Image (cartoon, rainbow, N blue to C red):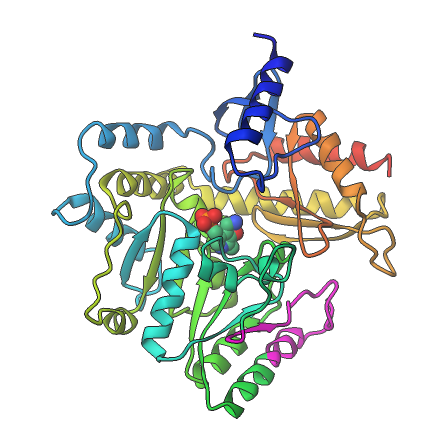
Amino acid sequence: INTSDNHETILKERKQYIGNNLSISYNKKVKIDKGALQYLYDDQGNTFLDCVNNVSHLGHCHPTVVKAMQKQVATLNTNTRYLNDNIVEYAKRLTATLPKELTVCYFTNSGSEANDLAIRMSRHFTKQKDVIVLDHAYHGTSTTAIEMSPYKFDGKGGFGKMTYIHKAQNPDMYRGEFKYGDKNAGEKYAKDMDRIIESLEIESKKPAAFICETLLGVGGQIALPPNYLKEVYAKVRKAGGVCIADEVQVGFGRVGTKFWGFELQDVIPDIVVLGKPIGNGHPLAAVITTQEIADAFNNGMEYFNTFGGNPVSMATGLAVLKVIEEEELQKNALEVGNYLLERLEALKPKHNIIGDVRGNGLFVGVELVKDRVTLQPAVPEIDQIVEMMKERGFFISTDGPLYNVLKIKPPIIFSRENAADFVDNLDAVLASF
Ligand code: PMP
């Protein structure tokens, strides 16, 4: 078949049959036919290095995961009301990666659904409704998750902020009020909690929860300032709220030095939300909490989830954990991530458009600016850069409140050669700006 006719037909039929508020990447669209580990192959014989998909954590179609899924799907797939080994085996393996306080698992099918459930639990536990979120955050697409997501409710088509939601300052040390070099930036950003907690006290209310990512994704690929979460969690707990860590983007070894993002801040959340990489592309997510919060949630209303925790999802999750361990992928994320950060940092003196390079492990952001003093965002340059990188065979994407941050979060099997190849090509592309 003629590929351009085929693309036209798909675009036309998508327009007709699929909800149109869904964007399609790139000006010149790509049709991907196959994926294998960190590579994607289009219908015209081109190979792309996937530098952005943090769902295919172990790489596309990882054979160990595919085999585990195939075996289980050909054996049994039912709901969780029967006895089955997989769910308990997986819950045991997963909780073994977490602090000892976090022992009770709930399995869902998406990060949105898991965040929604986490918020519901916090409200049962505290008997309060108000939630503190970080500005520009994104926590998902369900009604409750959108209410927790300034990125959505403040944006086009949003309903605005609900009265029971409170936005705290985004602790961005590049662009925010307290900058890199300020040793107390973490404490200073955390003080914004006092303002919110005091305003709640005036109304005789307490926070039900504070929720944030442990490195900010949509907020701009931002690593939190030292001590930030320690301070914030202490303030929120003192005020009676629970602390929820959204690990959907950053968990499972991506940050390199640690398995979980919250460990970088040396805190233990009351509720942890997991998603994206947990099933390497299979729809699986989880909420894990303490016995005390789980007991408060077990209040007479059953929690049943038709697909959540099914034997195929559990076999998938088990295979993912096994591969991370066997292939030592956390270590790889650290080594390759450090190399990538170092190489990107070295581009800074050559290219004025690079304002900031930041991240941990293979969760990396490069903020692009037109001017290093005014920090004017390099938009639309960033879109041209992403498009030019695609033409050279590299998929990356953009993020951040001003859409000027290159986000780089490849499958964590990414090799040093992949990183070198990527940076060499970015160097060549940036030379035109
Ligand atoms: N939390 C974070 C931090 C996310 O990035 C996302 C998805 N981008 C979600 C939650 C929602 O996950 P899902 O799309 O699986 O519902």
Asked if residue 12 lies left or right of residue 423, the reply is left
Q: Nearer the viewer, residue 198 or 289?
A: 198
Q: How far across and down, in percent of the image, does residue 282 sit?
A: 38, 38
Q: Is residue 226 magenta?
A: no
49 displayed left or right of 246: right
Viewport quadrant of the N terminus: top right
Inspect this view and state whether residue 246 appears: no
The residue positioned farthest toward the top in the image shown: 1
Is 173 colored magenta in this rendering?
yes
Q: Position of residue 232 (x, y in %)?
A: 53, 76
Identify which residue is drawn at 68% across, 29% down.
390
Q: Is residue 148 left or right of residue 390?
A: left
Give the mark count: 0
Which one is in front, 429 or 119? 119
- 376 lies above or below 425: below
Q: Going by the picture, which residue comes out furthest to the left?
A: 83
Q: Tell me if residue 71 comes above or below residue 201 in the rendering.
A: above
Answer yes or no: is residue 200 visible.
Answer: yes
Location of the C terminus by quadrant is top right
Kindly report the secondary structure that dominates the magenta region of the rendered protein: loop
> Which image quarter: residue 286?
bottom left
Q: Which residue does the image show at 52% across and 67% down from the upper left? A: 265
Picture quadrant where residue 116 is located: bottom left
- Expressed as whole percent of the image width and height from the top left, the position of residue 171 reads 64, 68
Residue at 76% in and 37% down:
385
Q: Position of residue 134 (x, y in %)?
A: 58, 67
Q: Residue furthest front?
A: 16
Q: Is 345 situated above or below 261?
A: above
Q: Which residues are magenta?
A: 163-192
